[in-house]
Amino acid sequence: MPSAAKSNTLWAVERYFEVMLYLMVLSGFATLAETGQLDPSSVLLVIAALTVRGYLLIAQTEFVIPEQWTNYLILLLASWYCADLFWISGKFLVATVHLILALLVIRLFTARRDRDFVLLAILAFGLVLAASVLTVDSTFLIGFSGFLLSTVATFILFDMRRSADAALIHAREKVGRSAAHQMSTALARLIPVLALTIFLMTLAIFFVLPRLSAGYLSAYASPAGLSTAFSDRVELGRLGEVQQSSSVVMHVEITGDKKGAYSQLLWRGVALNQFDGSTWSNNERQVILPRGSDGRFSPLLGDHPGHRRPIEYRVVVEPLGTNVFFLAARPRWLEGAYHMVTTDAAGALYDLDREHPIGLYQAASDLITPLASELRVGAGLAKTNASSSLSRELMSALQLPGLDPRIGNLAREVTAKSHNDYERAAAIEQYLRARYRYTLDLGHVQPKDPIAYFLFERKRGHCEYFASAMAVMLRTLGIPSRIVNGFRGGDFNDITSQYVVRMRNAHSWVEAYLADDGWISFDPTPANNLLNHGRPSRILLYLDAAASFWREWLINYDFQHQRVLGQQATSSSHHVFEYTRAWGQEQYDVLLAWARRLRRDMTTAPKKWGRIAVALLFELLVGLKGGALVCKSSVLRRALRPERAPRNSATLWYERMTRTLARRGWRKLPAQTPTEFARSIHEAELNRAVTEFTARYEKARFAESMDDARRLPELYQALSSRRRD
């Protein structure tokens, strides 16, 4: 707390500095806590310390821990950090964050010197730096903005505080609190301007500075808190309720789509072919995809019958904790900053580049829509086919554990009137959609056979049950099948022309193999029973657009983005230059045409243009001298009627008087006051006249006396007459 002997302004500087330093620490901790990566005990400890410190500031009470205790606390903290690093947490980033938080709590109650305040500011910056490693969410910008404002204010006040302490002479204080109020008002205006200037300059440096994908701090990022809506396995028979979340999983921008024409598109993740009665998994072997000369990875896919709809799209994925690329059906190529991409027999693509987790990629797919008539013509794969003629992939897609015999009977009953495999698959799909209900409630009984329990007893479930039941029923008929995990649809944001895919869009569907047609997708989940979350509000769409910009142009800003931005800037600059050059040429042509017409007119009528030139010259001279004439006229009016403007008239008459005396030999020096000049005149008569003139001048000028101003012309005339005598 400041000393009571300090002046009001110095007390205000000290007070504001303590408050802004506290806000700087508070905003730094809030930025870190918002990431959700801190353990509850650390959060509660710091909140308690900040609450106590805030109360002391409000109550204007000074509390500082003795310095001897501080040394013991620091030694204890160093020992605790080593234990935390090697035994308790075992992680460098977690232990370091704990150390920073503990130091912060200690320094909040031990700061007494300038170096302590500087250390507090450094610790607050460390909190923000740790938050930048632990999160990529756009809410970081909100906390960082508050930290930037408080930091600018803190360092301005810190410099004012040090300058005031170092000053040997202090200015006189005004009465009351007006000086402190003016200072606070000036700071409130200055700090946002400085913070905005710093932010804009930093932004310019950020976009211009060459980008390197070194990932210096990314290795310390914790995987905790990653989204878990997607899974590469399906477990049936769990109890409870499926928790749906509105958290964003990815943003997808489809080239040329400005109206949301693909709102129900399936984004394929991984196909699961191994089923043990309750769990689906994938046992397919992965092979490395070579990168082509164009930098793209191209899956090896054969031709497929049907109507092709090629699309290209761009995907920005939030941290999911998975290495699976989400792509539309039948991807043709994939492009991104990944060194190793693999694929399996089911067509899923994986990222094996640990240094570059999935974040941003571009791809193209063929949205083939097979016609039902073409599928019905297919020969189908009958049960009587020899097993030796089936590939390993199809054999694994026919594998079945021990099942309730009612499942096979139901499949045959539903498909009794079907003539080929496509009609059988379509019949099962339609049967499940029509006879069963969609629910997120997993039930309270753990069945021995989840598929039989779903089909014959509960008759309701979520998409994993519908897909699993259809796949198993198809396998009982000898039709190879598998389930696919991914996402369906998304909310279309017309501001950014992107689909916002959320956790609640996670979905499972079925792929069945039809001879001569390949793998065909079926979705047995009742579409009309899926939960309808409605269209997001306009405000949420704007917020999503801002978050998308943050993710795209700040978090994922790399050399490729910088190159695109540079190309756009170059193109825009060239466009502006060409426009300016064309405009200048157009104006030059207009002036040239006017000059040619003028020359032609002057040649045909020289007398007319001669009179015009004389008139213009006269108007120019009048314009140049008019201002001086107006000014002299105004001076003359004030001199003749001095009582109308005593102050200005007194100045005019005094200047005339000094010029008159200067011609007589009495020149007024610049350093002399009017009274000193009058005393310097040794002629008695002249001295009396100048003294009286000076007295009248000072009253007229400084007291605005009209009577004294009215006397000045008369006294001046007397002085002038005396000179001529």
Image (cartoon, rainbow, N blue to C red):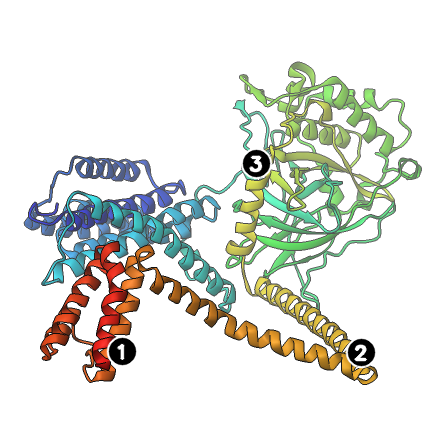
Q: Which amino acid does the dot numbered 1 rest on?
A: Arg
* Label 1 SS: helix
Q: Which mark is residue 617?
A: none
Residue in the picture at 52% in, 47% down: 319
* Residue 150 position within the rendered picture, expressed as x and y whole percent measured from the top left: 32, 49
Mark 1 sits on what residue?
Answer: 659
**Position of the N terminus by quadrant:** top left
Instruction: Locate residue 465: give its quadrant.
Output: top right
Mark 2 sits on what residue?
Answer: 597
* Residue 429 position within the rendered picture, expressed as x and y whole percent measured from the top left: 78, 27
Mark 3 sits on what residue?
Answer: 539
Question: Badge 1, how many Cα within 10 Å: few under 14, some, many 20+?
Answer: some
**Position of the C terminus by quadrant:** bottom left
Between label 1 and label 2, give the one nearer the viewer: 1
Question: Badge 2, how many Cα within 10 Å: few under 14, some, many 20+?
Answer: few
Tags 1 and 2 in contact by the CB under 8 Å rule? no
Between label 3 and label 1, give the one nearer the viewer: 1
Between label 2 and label 3, give the one nearer the viewer: 2
Question: Badge 3, how many Cα within 10 Å: few under 14, some, many 20+?
Answer: few
Tags 2 and 3 in contact by the CB under 8 Å rule? no
75 vs 388, nearest the viewer: 75
228 vs 558, nearest the viewer: 558
Q: Which amino acid does the dot numbered 2 rest on?
A: Arg
On screen, residue 621 versus residue 398, left or right, reads left
* Residue 521 position within the rendered picture, expressed as x and y whole percent measured from the top left: 77, 38
On screen, residue 586 versus residue 1, left or right, reads right
Between marks 3 and 1, how big is the CA–CA gap? 75 Å
Between marks 2 and 3, how big is the CA–CA gap? 61 Å
Compare marks 1 and 2 and give the one earlier in the sequence: 2
